[in-house]
Image: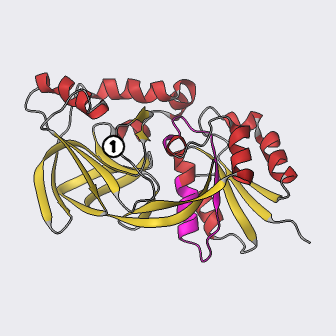
Amino acid sequence: MNAPRMLFVYNPHAGKATIRGHLLDIIDIFTKAGYEVTAYPTQSQGDGEKRVRDRADDYSIVVCSGGDGTLDEVVSGMMNSEFKVPIGYVPAGSTNDYAKSLKIPSVMTKAAQIVVNGNDFLSDVGTMNDKYFVYCAAFGIFTDVSYSTDQSLKNALGHAAYILQSVKELQDIKTYHMKITYGNGTVLEDEFIYGMVTNSIQVGGIQNITGKNVKLDDGEFEVTLVRKPKSLIDLPNLVGALLDSKILSSNDLINIKLRNITFESDIPVAWTRDGEYGGEHTKVVINNLPRAVTIKVP
């Protein structure tokens, strides 16, 4: 009887290039579990998506190791392929937001054990116009942080790099005039400094920023919108409410649960998709695809 085949896609540069010291141990865990492993190091952005999309049909599982951006590529490749199989995830990025939401361990060998011994979890997946995303699509003040933070700084400082970049950008807050349509035609039009559509317990390494009672398989996103504060004096309370709504509240902070939402702007607005640059758009249509992909979890 032939051993089941595993495609193992990994980003050798993610995070602090952590995988380089664990690669052989991870592959050994997979091999001892009975898999014939094909290991593929990604060569450029988008390479992981293409490799998964164009894979042969005899792989029984696809595993990825890297940051949330690598997971995004692998999930996108799976969604664009003709046949679906479970996905395993060995996190190796700077913040690993989605892995922490799924309670996947940050110790890479433990995460590898989850891949071969864990349970199947059917997770929602989002679409942002014609692209897929796993856990977050966002615009605004903190959105620039992930892709404007230098990769070497990310590798050296990890989560601290995001915080440093955020503090630097608070000095010059941009606003975005958005017309937002959701539900049965509800329209919200205002000046915003930030907006995110999430399917995650944490974003940017900050836990519980996405709302209460978050479930990753309920067919709904958590949407957080931050209006432009009337003065800089209101900003600390607004940031405090964003970080912990139990302690502080703000009229400029809007939280909604929904399945689809449309953002329209007069000028192109930069977005991120799972922490990576998602292009500039004047219209973004976001939809939830319930329980669309299978991921191995504890």
Question: Looking at the picture, how far across and down is residue 30, in whole percent?
Answer: 80, 51
Q: Is mark 1 on a helix, strand or loop?
A: loop
What amino acid does circle 1 point to? Lys
Horizontal relation, residue 261 to residue 49: left or right = left
Rendered view: 123 above or below 192: below
| Number of residues whose C-alpha sits closer than 10 Å to that of mark 1, classed few (under 14), some (14–19) or many (20 or more) | few
Residue name at image x 60 percent, y 43 percent: 104
Residue 220: percent from left, percent from top: 35, 59
Q: Residue 289, relative to residue 233: is it above or below?
A: below
Residue topped by disc 1: 212
Q: Where is residue 23 in the image (x, y as percent from the top left)?
A: 77, 41
Q: Quadrant of the N terminus?
A: bottom right
Viewer can see residue 42: no
Judged left or right of residue 144, residue 22 is right
Asked whether 92 falls inside the magenta stretch, the response is: yes
Magenta segment: 72-97
Q: Residue at x 65, y 71 (%)?
A: 54
